[in-house]
Amino acid sequence: MFSSVIVKKPGKSYVEGLTTSNLGMPNYEELLIQHENYVKALEKCNVNIAYLEADENYPDSTFVEDTAVLTSEFAVLCNPGAASRNGEIVSMEKELLNHFENYITINSPGHVDGGDVLQADQVFYIGISERTNEEGAKQLQTILQQRGFEAHIIPLKEFFHLKTGIAYLGNNKMILAGEFVDHELFDKYDKIIIPKEDEYSANCILVNDYVIIPSGYPATQQKLEAHGYKTIELPMSEFQKQDGGLSCLSLRF
Ligand code: CIR
């Protein structure tokens, strides 16, 4: 169960953020509505919400997930791999101290984006990507192992971030897409497989009693409901335009 989440309002500069998507320029008004709906969905999931003000200096800073790895017991401040995003950790560092007595850091030349880190109960998976390098992944692995967790490092082949193609839904159930479907590390899970055409919906989040999924993926919704989950669908078009998914918009702990 999660008791708290951190979210951050997108600023007007959001439209100038990093993207590879070719889906066009985000509409700021629509973006704000989608973000408000995201916050309302979290309220329904019964968590305390720390809602940070927008920071125009960091266009991508609404994607708070990349700045930290949090559990109920400890916090790791990441060292994001994109130069234009690295300074986002300065304000996150302050926010973490509202929730934790202290935090551990990933240090250069190590880089980790939180989007490359998935927790499944006592096991963590850490992707090596364009943003997370081997040095950063190893630092995080050591931090996690010292705290009694298993931690596996997975070099990514195609996905942008690890969590672009995977989500853990508790009860040994794992959502998997693309390069993770046949990955032997995930063979021990009860797999919910997402086909290529629905790949964006692999990035969904279990928050207490609900799984929040992007709207427009009825096959994914049906699969989740067949597995006994209650779902909340959210329009995500303006986040998708900047390579963002549902998990990226919050830190849950
Ligand atoms: C970026 O390129 O960093 C942002 N435009 C998107 C970050 C998405 N974050 C995530 O998948 N965890």
Image (cartoon, grey):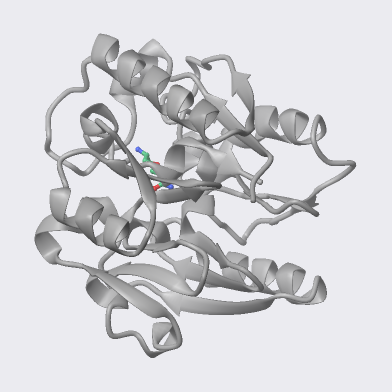
Q: In the drawing, does residue 157 fall left or right of residue 44?
A: left
Residue 213, compared with residue 196, is above or below; it is: above
Q: Measuring 37% from the left and 11% from the top, which residue is drawn there?
A: 12
Q: Residue at x 28, y 85 (%)?
A: 182
Count of numbered marks: 0
Q: Is residue 126 above or below residue 211?
A: below
The quarter of the picture where residue 30 lies is: top left
Q: Is residue 81 visible?
A: no
Instruction: Report which quarter residue 25 is drawn in.
Output: top left
Q: Is residue 123 left or right of residue 218?
A: right
- Residue 83 position in % (x across, y down): 48, 41
Residue 24 rendering spot, x and y as whole percentages: 12, 28
Quarter-of-image position of residue 178? bottom left
Which one is nearer the viewer's eye here, 228 or 6?
228
Q: 52 or 155, which lies in front?
A: 52
> In the image, ligand 1 is in what quadrant?
top left
**Which residue is at the front of the view, 209 or 185?**
209
**145 in relation to 231, above or below:** below
- Which residue shows up at 82% across the image and 34% down it? 97
Q: From this viewpoint, is residue 12 visible? A: yes
Q: Residue furthest right?
A: 101
Residue sitting at x 81%, y 70%: 147
Where does residue 91 sit, x and y in percent of width and height?
Answer: 67, 27
Residue 215 lies, with reference to residue 108, above or below; the image says above
Q: Residue 52: image x %, image y %?
A: 60, 20
